[in-house]
Image: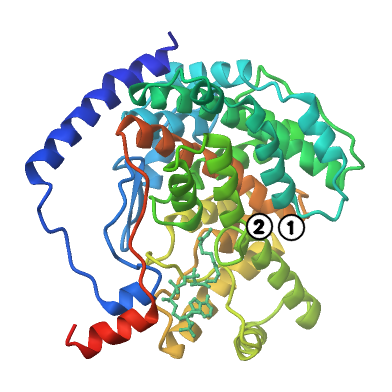
């Protein structure tokens, strides 16, 4: 049996037992109360999900199994001579709950390389997309197409699955899926933007390094570093965000990981979620077109005001939970300060950091005026020549697979049930308040 699977059995199965005992003993404890506002406000702040892989603190930002991003940039394994963590390491941490050694991370590299063969019909399907098909649509369809390979779906249909083994078939599908995503994403990129000239994988490289290579940026050591950082920091943001929650919700119907993850990707493709990264760069480029390559603070202020007056949000700013600058933004800023300090787009991003928050604060309604992860990622990619903005959310999706699929394996190991909250009509609400609540 694979070492990673053994380790998961060692850690997750006793945890599942402990949780069952906890629920038996404390199942009737009141966790919290919620207001009518929250019911109409997208369930903000209601504790209603279990997600083991990470936890978001409004003031401190994301913690992966308790570790912050700056800590993980130091503590997660790196390739020999490398400076950024290997995404394989954060997957191990989220799945197992312990920091991996370099050997643990490189075992995952080899494991994913073994599983990375994408069936030809998936490429054929991508080949038939009109090139103006949004890359996220191609990505989601390609994931769905691979569903024919689902171990979970096949074993379930054949009656081979016992509830106790759901996690194992979910593990197999999730590992296969994660292993194949970089190839699929790179194929979509090259199909859409590089005249369908594809680049064969180099399985001897680490997962992120090989992805950078297949995209066509393998010559740049810095781009590979950026991919390792990018794919690590976008991996998870606890369970309530749209992509994580959707994957969990669809998975709760025992839809297999292909169905569940593809659904999650459709949520990530929304402009209030992952699509914001392409929106940010487009907005910055429009700003440059309108006022010139080196806008002043005053010109930026006017542009922001015009965007708001047009009834639009400022992309890359604000967050449903965070109340401080996103640590994922700061990690990318540190990267930029090291490698592209004089880049003109980075300078604009830095100016926006100074100019946007006071303007959003002045509106009086924005709960978090600070930049989020998407405010920064695009200009880093543009710096290395990746200027196809519509592709950016696919990169986010490849990374997000690590967190949401590790969570899905945990969902099945913990035996979490079908998700089915209660819903009411607004008529019901009116009667409820009229009768004194
Ligand atoms: N620009 C202008 N107005 C904003 C704003 C922004 N960046 N952020 C919030 N607001 C507005 C909201 O639209 C809302 O206005 P109305 O009451 O008129 O509807 C009001 O301020 C209160 O919103 P909030 O409670 O502060 O924020 P929400 O939890 O409702 O929304 C969002 C959080 C991230 C969706 C929001 O801040 C936003 O639209 N930001 C811009 C898009 C963006 O960057 N999205 C990516 C977020 C990170 C992520 O998920 N990445 O994948």
Image location of residue 375, percent across then percent down: 57, 64
Task: Spot the residue most to the top.
Answer: 1
Q: Any atom of ligand 1 within 8 Å of the CB at mark 1?
A: no
Contact between marks 2 and 1 (CB within 8 A): the answer is: yes
Q: Which mark is residue 331?
A: none
Image: 284 above or below 434: above
Number of other residues with Cα within 10 Å of mark 1, as a class: few under 14, some 14 to 19, many 20 or more:
some
| Whether residue 383 is visible | no
Q: Quadrant of the C terminus?
A: bottom left
Left or right placement of residue 249 versus residue 275 in this view: left
Q: Which mark is residue 389?
A: 1
Look at mark 2 in the image and give the residue it sits on. Answer: 378
Q: Secondary structure at mark 2?
A: helix
The answer, for residue 281, to whether it is visible in the render is yes
- Front one among 187 and 285: 187
Q: Residue at x 84, y 33 (%)?
A: 124
Q: Which one is in front in this view, the residue at disc 2 or the one at disc 1?
A: 1
Which of the two labelled residues, at mark 2 and mark 1, occupies the earlier sequence position?
A: 2
Q: Looking at this rendering, what residue extends furthest in the right direction?
A: 195
- 209, 112: nearer the viewer: 112
The quadrant of the image that shows the N terminus is top left
Position of residue 145 measured from the top left corner of the image (x, y, whole percent): 70, 36
Position of residue 264 measured from the top left corner of the image (x, y, whole percent): 54, 49
Disc 1 is placed on an element classified as helix
* Residue pictured at 33% horizontal, 23% vertical: 164
């Amino acid at each position: 049996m694979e070492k990673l699977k053994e380790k998961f059995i060692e850690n997750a199965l006793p945890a599942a037992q402990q949780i069952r005992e906890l629920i038996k003993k404390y199942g009737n404890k009141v966790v919290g109360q919620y207001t009518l506002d929250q019911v109409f406000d997208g369930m903000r702040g209601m504790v209603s999900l279990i997600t083991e892989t990470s936890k978001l603190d409004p003031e401190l930002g994301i913690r992966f199994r308790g570790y912050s991003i700056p800590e993980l940039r130091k503590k997660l394994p790196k390739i020999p001579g490398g400076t950024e963590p290997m995404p394989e390491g954060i997957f191990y941490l989220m799945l197992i709950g312990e920091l991996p050694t370099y050997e643990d991370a490189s075992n995952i590299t080899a494991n994913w390389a073994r599983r990375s063969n994408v069936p030809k019909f998936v490429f054929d399907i991508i080949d038939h997309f009109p090139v103006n098909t949004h890359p996220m649509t191609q990505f989601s369809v390609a994931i769905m197409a691979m569903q024919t390979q689902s171990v979970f779906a096949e074993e379930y249909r054949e009656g081979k699955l016992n509830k106790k083994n759901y996690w194992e078939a979910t593990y197999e599908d999730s590992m296969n899926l994660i292993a194949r995503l970089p190839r699929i994403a790179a194929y979509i990129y090259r199909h859409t933007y590089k005249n369908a000239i594809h680049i064969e994988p180099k399985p001897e490289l680490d997962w992120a390094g090989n992805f950078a290579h297949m995209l066509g940026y393998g010559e740049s050591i810095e781009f590979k570093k950026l991919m390792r950082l990018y794919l690590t920091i976008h991996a998870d943001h606890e369970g309530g965000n749209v992509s994580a929650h959707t994957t969990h919700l669809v998975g709760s119907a025992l839809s297999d990981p292909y169905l569940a993850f593809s659904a999650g990707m459709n949520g990530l493709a929304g402009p209030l979620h992952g699509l914001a990264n392409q929106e940010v760069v487009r907005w910055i480029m429009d700003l440059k077109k309108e006022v010139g390559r080196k806008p002043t603070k005053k010109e930026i202020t006017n542009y922001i005001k015009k965007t708001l007056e047009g009834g639009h949000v400022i992309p890359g700013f604000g967050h449903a939970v965070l109340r401080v600058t996103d640590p994922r933004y700061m990690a990318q800023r540190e990267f930029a300060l090291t490698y592209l300090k004089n880049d003109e787009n980075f300078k604009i991003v830095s100016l926006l950091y100074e100019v946007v928050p006071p303007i959003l604060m002045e509106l009086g309604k924005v709960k978090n005026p600070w930049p989020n992860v998407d405010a920064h990622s695009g200009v880093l990619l543009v710096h290395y020549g990746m200027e196809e903005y519509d592709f950016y959310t696919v990169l986010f999706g490849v990374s997000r697979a690590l967190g949401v699929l590790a969570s899905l394996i945990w969902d099945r190991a913990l035996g979490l049930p079908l998700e089915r909250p209660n819903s009411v009509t607004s008529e019901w609400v009116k009667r409820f308040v009229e009768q004194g609540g």
